[in-house]
Amino acid sequence: MSWTDERVELLKQLWNEGLSASQIAGQLGGVSRNAVIGKVHRLKLEGRAKTALPGQAEAPVQKAVEAVIETRAVEVEISGRAAAQMGGGRSVVRSVGATALKVETETDLVVQHVEGPGGEVVPISRNLTLVQLTERTCKWPLGDPLSEDFRFCGNPSGDSSPYCTYHARLAFQPPSERRRVR
DNA sequence: CCCTGATTCGC
DNA sequence: GCGAATCAGG
């Protein structure tokens, strides 16, 4: 594949939307994340201030972003408790998406699932799109394959299975162990 | 180990 | 210009 005008335009768009190089590579197809990063540099469309130069003060913008993330962390925590009270079951916080990384580190994945009314354990899927799947993300389908909202579980799968531990059971265990498929 | 972007350098 | 290999970091 080559860098046609359209592909370059899409690259710029996705990069500005904050997608990672590997995700962009997946969307474009036919290129590696290195290719994407290389192209980004050649186009001189930086914008991802990652490596803070030593001795330099933190950029105000970066601090603002962190403040927002901090706020979101609290909100998620609150909503998690609310859910626990309303549902009567154990419910906890599970970060989803790049903007909630702070939550993940602070709660250390306190919960990865929710217990339903019947006591069944239902995992909180990451709802990844096809292009976001990697060799070790759960490929359990969610929703209608013909719909735009079609997603995959995306939870860690371990390299021995195409599914996370929960979905591996639904996929390979006897129907008697199945409950509601979500 | 998984992932991220940054840089180098042969092509 | 391109991107694999490599580096640095979370």
Image: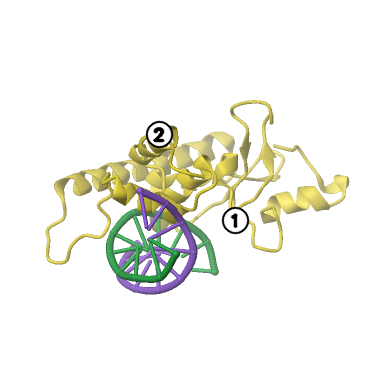
Chain colours: A yellow, B green, C purple
Query: Dot 1 corresponds to which residue?
Result: A156
Q: Is residue A118 rendered to the left or right of residue A130?
A: right
Residue in view at x 43 percent, y 42 percent: A3
Q: Residue at x 50, y 41 (%)?
A: A28
**What's the chain of the residue with tag 2?**
A
Amino acid type, residue under disc 2 in the picture: Asp
Q: Is residue A116 left or right of residue A80?
A: right
Tag nearer the camera, 2 or 1: 2
**Does dot 1 land on a helix, a strand or a loop?**
loop
Which residue is nearer to you in this view: A176 or A58?
A58
Residue at left 26%, top 46%? A44
Name the amino acid, label 1. Pro
State the image quarter where residue A51 is shown: bottom left
Q: Earlier in the sequence, mark 2 or mark 1?
A: 2
The mark found on residue A46 in the picture is none
Picture layout, residue A158 above or below residue A100 = below
- Rate crowding at label 2 as few (under 14), some (14 to 19) or many (20 or more) other CA atoms within 10 Å: few
**Quarter of the figure that contains the C terminus of chain A:** top right
Cβ–Cβ under 8 Å for marks 2 and 1: no
Q: Position of residue A91 (x, y in %)?
A: 54, 44
Q: In screen coordinates, is A89 left or right of A106?
A: right
Percent across and percent down for residue A87 are: 58, 36
Q: Residue at x 59, y 56 (%)?
A: A156
Q: Which residue is mark 2?
A: A5
Label 2 element class = helix
x and y percent of residue A84 in the render? 53, 41
The spot of residue A78 in percent (x, y) is: 40, 40
